Image (cartoon, rainbow, N blue to C red):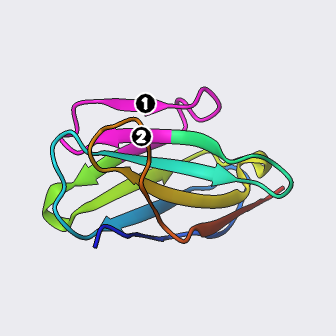
């Protein structure tokens, strides 16, 4: 079962930090891509960041570059999203997803974790 499980969301003041975790069970390949997405109320879901399981390649949305860092811990089968200098516009439900075969399509999605940034 490759269902990812997110945790670490919460309420934080603007300028603060949170670290989200995505625990993935099952076998992952070095080419497997783990991505973070977010969806704010009334808005489309948007890409935030992604990393391949080898840790070689990362990618970020322009809106979070320099503030968010994605990383992985192979031993724990977990991907992290460190979010610093949070802004009210970062408020959203954050989802972790797996592109297990690096096909360009995210096949497995978590249930989401709420991040709320107060001004």
65 and 111: which one is in front? 111
Residue matched to label 2: 50
Secondary element type, mark 1: strand
x and y, in percent, of residue 112 in the image: 57, 68
Q: Which quarter of the rendering shows the N terminus?
A: bottom left
The location of residue 95, given as percent across then percent down, is 54, 59
Q: Residue 65, located in which quarter of the rendered image?
A: top right
Per the image, is 52 magenta?
Answer: yes
Q: Considering the image in quadrants, where does the C terminus appear?
A: bottom right
Work out whether residue 34 or residue 90 is closer to the camera in this orientation and state it. 34
For the image shown, how many numbered marks are present on the structure? Answer: 2
- Dot 1 alpha-carbon crowd within 10 angstroms: few under 14, some 14 to 19, many 20 or more: some
Q: Earlier in the sequence, mark 1 or mark 2?
A: 2
78 left or right of 83 in image? left
Residue 46, percent from left and from top: 65, 42
Label 2 element class = strand
Quadrant of residue 24 in the image?
bottom left
Q: Is residue 71 left or right of residue 69?
A: left
Say which of 82 and 36 sits in front. Answer: 36
Mark 1 highlights which residue? 59
Q: Position of residue 35 (x, y in %)?
A: 44, 47
Q: Within 10 Å of the Cα at label 2, are there few (<14), some (14-19), or many (20+) other Cα atoms?
A: many
101, above or below 116, in the image? above
Location of residue 21 by image quarter: bottom left
Residue 117 shown left or right of residue 51 in the figure: right
- Report if the CB atoms under discs 1 and 2 are less than 8 Å apart: yes
Residue placed farthest to the top in the image? 62
Vertical arrangement, residue 110 with respect to residue 105, above or below: below
- Disc 1 from disc 2: Cα separation: 5 Å
Image point (39%, 44%), residue name = 70
Q: Residue drawn at (15%, 42%), measured in percent from left and top?
A: 30
Magenta residue span: 49-70
């Amino acid at each position: 079962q490759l269902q990812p499980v997110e945790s670490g969301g919460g309420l934080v003041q603007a300028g603060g930090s949170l670290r989200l975790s995505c625990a993935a069970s099952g076998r992952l390949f070095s080419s497997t891509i783990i991505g973070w997405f977010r969806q704010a109320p009334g808005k489309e879901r948007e890409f935030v960041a992604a990393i391949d399981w080898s840790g070689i390649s990362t990618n970020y949305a322009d809106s979070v570059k320099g503030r968010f860092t994605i990383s992985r811990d192979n031993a724990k089968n977990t991907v992290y999203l460190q979010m610093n200098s949070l802004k009210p516009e970062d408020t959203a439900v954050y989802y972790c997803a797996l592109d297990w075969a690096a096909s360009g399509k995210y096949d497995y999605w978590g249930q989401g974790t709420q991040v709320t940034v107060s001004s």
